[in-house]
Amino acid sequence: MNRKVSIAPMMDCTDRHERYFLRLISKNVLLYTEMIVSEAIDRGDKKKLLSFNIKEKPVSLQLGGSSPKLLANASKLGEEFGYDEINLNLGCPSKKVQKNKFGACLIKEPNLVADCLTEMQAKTKLPVTVKTRIGYDNVEDYENLYNFINTLKSTGVKTFIVHARKAVLGNFTPKQNLNIPPLKYEMVYKLKKDFNNLEIIINGGITSTDQIKNHLIKTDGVMIGRSAYHSPYLLADIEKDIFNNQNILSRQEVIEQLVPYVKEEIKKGTRMNQIMRHTLGLFHGQTGSSFWKRYLSENMCVRDADVKKIDHIMDKVKSAPKMHQVGQID
Ligand SMILES: Cc1cc2nc3c(=O)[nH]c(=O)nc-3n(C[C@H](O)[C@H](O)[C@H](O)COP(=O)(O)O)c2cc1C
């Protein structure tokens, strides 16, 4: 599997609609689901939680949890639903997550995590990977990170995605935890040096193809979160500069190709804004970007949109940035 560039799991962002949209821009990046908790998969509507469009592939299913049995069952189901990888979240620091014992607080319990990973790998043939942080609270020395990875490595896991900031498990909000602890890329580079046979993917604060290229000198892959969500056409630069693929769609063509998907989904009961909200940043930095955002914000929430209405709205939406340029927008 090619993990040179992946798009980070992000709650409320990387749902199946966002992934379908991003896949129109990039054929080569690896996409992740939002974190799905193994307990929810156990008790909830499995089809609703796990099904996705085959065109999104390759997609990794990110799981949260700390029950070896439930994580193993969820991994097996993930394979049955057609995912390409199972990833365990050991990096999310939110309070709710800590209460239920999953995410970053599990860095404190390497043996429990190792049990989870062993059970998961026993139940699926898919690669099982880990996403973690460089440390937590005051435990942020390299030795601790080294020992943690070394313990997990003994289960046979070969791919580690490391967000190069520690998690603060006390009073920080999730947003603060994504911004305040400083990025320490050197610790991730050192991991790659010390575990040369492992695949080490670096994550945190990466926003351009130049930065990606620099990180790829010292690591095996780069994971990008917020910058890809806020400026999705960055993926076109990634296709061109990192994967050497010049055959990419223009922004306009991306929307044109999204229209049939929107129509199909609306027939199934999806609301237009559930899809189109992910495209707000498509024209980021371009003339007409604010018109695009405004037009979408004003029109994507129409209730009971019949197909005719959708056609009209989508035609407008497709041409919104162009119309701005010729002063035609209404
Ligand atoms: C809105 C949002 C939701 C997130 N949800 C998850 C999640 O479900 N699982 C996870 O492992 N990390 C989650 N993260 C963290 C990202 O995967 C990533 O590690 C982090 O944003 C740092 O990368 P970036 O600086 O490129 O954004 C989330 C981040 C954001 C901004």
Image (cartoon, grey):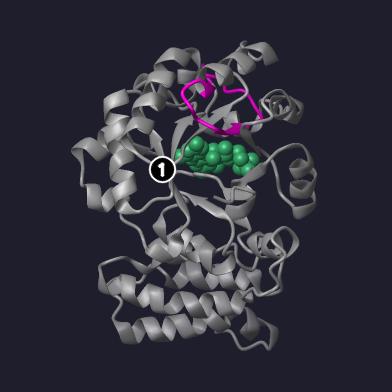
From the viewer's perspective, is residue 40 above or below residue 84?
above
- The location of residue 55, given as percent across then percent down, is 43, 66
From the viewer's perspective, is residue 243 above or below residue 77?
below
Identify the image quadrant of the C terminus.
bottom right
| Residue lying at 43% horizontally and 73% vertically, measured from the top left | 299
Nearest to the observer: residue 255 or residue 87:
87
| Residue lying at 42% horizontally and 86% vertically, measured from the top left | 312
> Is 83 placed left or right of 167 in the picture?
left
Ligand 1 quadrant assignment:
top right
Q: Which residues are magenta?
A: 153-171
Nearest to the observer: residue 224 or residue 296:
224
> Is 323 placed left or right of 274 in the picture?
right
Quarter where residue 305 is shown: bottom left
From the viewer's perspective, is residue 212 above or below residue 169?
below
| Residue lying at 25% horizontally and 69% vertically, measured from the top left | 268
**Disc 1 packing (10 Å; few <14; some 14–19; many ≥20):** many
Per the image, label 1 sits on a secondary structure element best described as loop
Identified by mark 1, the residue type is Leu
| Residue lying at 25% horizontally and 67% vertically, measured from the top left | 269
Nearest to the observer: residue 224 or residue 245:
245
- The location of residue 117, given as percent across then percent down, is 41, 26
Residue that label 1 marks: 126
From the viewer's perspective, is residue 97 above or below residue 227?
above
